[in-house]
Amino acid sequence: MKQFLRFFFFLFLSVAVITVQAQVSGSSINIDQLSDAQLMQYLGMANGSGMSEADLIAKAKEKGLSDSQIQQLRQRLQTMQGINGSAANKGSDTANFRNGIKSNLPYNQTEMVNGLPVFGSELFSKENLTFEPNLQIPTPKNYQLGVGDQLNIDLFGYSDVSFKLKVTPEGVIRIPSLGPVKVAGLSFEDAQTKIKGQLAKIYPQIQTGKTSVQVSLGQIRSVRVTLIGEVERPGTYTLSSLSNMANALYASGGPNKIGSFRDIELIRNGKRISVFDLYDFLLNGDLSKNLRLEDDDIIKVSAYTTRVAITGAVKRKAIYETRANENLNDLIKVAGGFSDIAFKDFVRVVRYGKNQKEAITVNNYQYTKFVLQSGDSCHIDSISNLYSNRVVISGAVFHPGVYSVENFPGLKELIQTAGLREDAYTQRGWIRRRNDHYVPVILDFNVKDIVAGNQSIALQREDSVRIYSVLDIRAKDSVSINGEVNKPGYYGYADSLQLQDLILMAGGLKEGASGKKIEVSRRIRGNGNEGEIPQYAVVANVELNKDLGASSAAPKFVLQPFDIVSVRRNPAYKEQKTVTLDGEVLYPGKYVLTNNKETLTEIIQQAGGLKSSAYAPGAILIRNTYADSIDYALADEKMQNVKNQVNGIDSLSKILVNSLNRGKKIVGIHLEKALQTPNGMDDIPLMDSDIIRIPRKSETVQTFGSVYVPKKVVYQDGLSFKDVIAESGGFLTYASKKRAYVMYPNGELRITKHFLFFKRYPKLVPGAEVYVPQRDRKPFGLADIGGIAGIITGVATTILVIKNL
């Protein structure tokens, strides 16, 4: 900026010098009386003086300019800089890019009619194809300026100044120190010429070429265009002035279901100036009719006149719009032409007649003459899948596949060309052939005789030759291994496979495997005698070293197909067994059993004993089990309602149900008795993976099931079953009182005992859970009447017996 001001200061000093020489003596010069236009004119004259800054200042003082006048010139310079600099010079050294006008992207889907796309509609369903004009290209020479356009005017050479001027609503630009210049309605090229001529009035060096002028189009104006007719979203749109018809169509969503893609009119000032055919762009890339838009232009999309469908063996199956002079051959070209599998001799056409459909067959010599009608559906068939000269060979050959019967008329030549593999079965092959009625028949042959020339067979069209492999016609031999190996299972058999090899294939022996007890079970194969053999298999005992070495001293036991190898466990090998102690003990966690007789009390002692808050009668033991159907049936009977009732509640029954689902069960224990009498009847031995849970003492009793309000009731001495039911609101209407039961904290169950009308409910302890199942709801009928009658009879009989006592 300092250099810029300095340069202008040079120029203004030159103006002052020239003005002094031309008018009056230096002492009488009034800088304020000089107009901006005069300063601009003298500025151009000073460019040619060739003086340096020192020369200009010295010359100015020589002609009478004082230091105060020179300072006044500086202030005038700053004032003009404030007027013109912000609008003209600011940012003149940086690139200015035009800003576009964003339009809404279309959300249309490709138009489909009877499963076929309408050709051209996909153009308006793609967000990456917008037709948005490139705003950063050089301004076209024929671009017509209008209100809102911005012109960038740059002068460089002896004069260096820039202007950014917008075209006002009056159609003019206002050049500082020059006045308005009308440019609206002019082409960009004409506007350049006019602006240069006007600037030459205040910059004489323009005509001499010492100062150059460059006029460019900065920010462009917007135009408003209206789309009418058969478009998806008709209306008025605001677009950039470089936009064209395709851009406006895209912004409006394109033609609608009945809109034409080939009859799109541009109307300007009431006159039709262009008809745009989108097919010219889609098929030929021709956008010559895609004119640039101007303010108040109207784009009209007419309804289609003729649409036809083409399907079958063409490259682009779709619905196309045709013109009056286009025929079937033109339609096929528009569809991309015939596909590679097309049958080109005729095209089948379905046409809507006056009263019903018509079927028309158009031969290939009629394609250019056949006139299409709207609604026609053309179908091009594919050629037949049959071969005119094919033979096929498959199986145990090096080059299976399709061959020509002309090149290989005989079976021997075909087999020799395809090449027999080493595993080919040479005793028999077959040919699948069609007879005169096209019914398949099988012809067998000896492969060895054919190759040797002892037998010959002539091939026919569509013959299929099959050569089998010996691997295909033998059983898939395998051996299996189980027991103490890392990867038990089935393995493929190979000749001379030894026992040690199979063990290695199975990942080797486990640590606890016994090499002295390996059994091999072998099938019994008959020796031609078809009599019954009572024995199933032969079992051999093999003894191996664990290193499985291949030394000559190692036993070599060769396996046979389908042998079953069983590796036994060393009886002296014992793995660590653990139990889990959880709950109210001093040191809960996992503990290792030292022997198979370690008991509850011993583990409790290892854990530091029970905490003061522990409730020993509520301790439970969860143990692994291989539950059978009877166990689950019993659990289902007892827990049918519990599964639904205890969902989300931490209850003993939920623990029991979850344990059963994981293959575990609860073992009823009496920990308090075991602690009182160690090694007694209740101090049971523990097993691997046992889980012992010792809860806190609970001071409540929980009710579940068919009571009005399932709840927890505070336990007090003497609390009975009926008291708890009463606290829970009593039994529901369909409660099964006789099937009610109590689960104690240690997992034991006590059911209700009953005789006639007398029921004996289980006793309650702290932490117990009371369950009242729901009885089956059956409609009242004869069965209920019979039951009631039976009860009445039983009661009467009882009363009579008591009376007679």
Image (cartoon, rainbow, N blue to C red):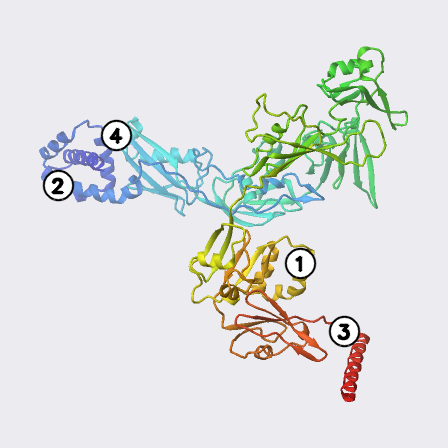
Q: What x and y, as percent, mark residue 553?
A: 58, 22
Real-space CA distance between mark 3 and mark 1, rounded to the nearest whole angstrom: 30 Å
Q: Nearer the viewer, residue 407 or 388?
A: 407
Q: Position of residue 634 (x, y in %)?
A: 67, 62
Dot in front, 2 or 1: 1
Label 2: how many residues lie within 10 Å, few (<14), some (14-19) or many (20+)? many
Mark with earlier residue (3, 1): 1
User: Which residue, given by chain and number where applicable, does mark 3 sit on?
Assistant: 779
Name the residue: 46% across, 38% down. Answer: 144
Residue 252 or residue 429, whichever sits in front: 429
Foreground mark, 4 or 1, reads: 1
Q: CA distance from mark 3 to mark 2?
A: 121 Å
Q: Earlier in the sequence, mark 3 or mark 2?
A: 2
Nearer-the-camera pick, 153 or 480: 480
- Label ID, residue 632: 1
- Residue 584: give x, y in percent of width and height: 45, 62
Chain-order first, disc 2 or disc 4: 2
The residue pinned by badge 4 equals 158
Residue at far bottom of view: 803
Eye-nearest disc, 3 or 2: 3
According to the picture, the residue beneath numbered tag 2 turns out to be 69
Q: Give the secondary structure at mark 3.
A: loop
Q: Judge whether 675 appears above or below 549 on screen.
A: below
Mark 4, residues whose alpha carbon is within 10 Å: few (<14), some, or many (≥20)? many
Q: Amino acid at mark 4?
A: Tyr
Q: Secondary structure at mark 2?
A: helix
The image position of residue 53, as x and y in percent, is 15, 31
Amino acid on which disc 3 is placed: Pro
Question: How far is disc 2 from disc 1 in space, using C-alphas?
Answer: 115 Å
* Residue farthest toward the top in the current orientation of the protein: 453
Answer with the quarter of the image where residue 367 lies: top right
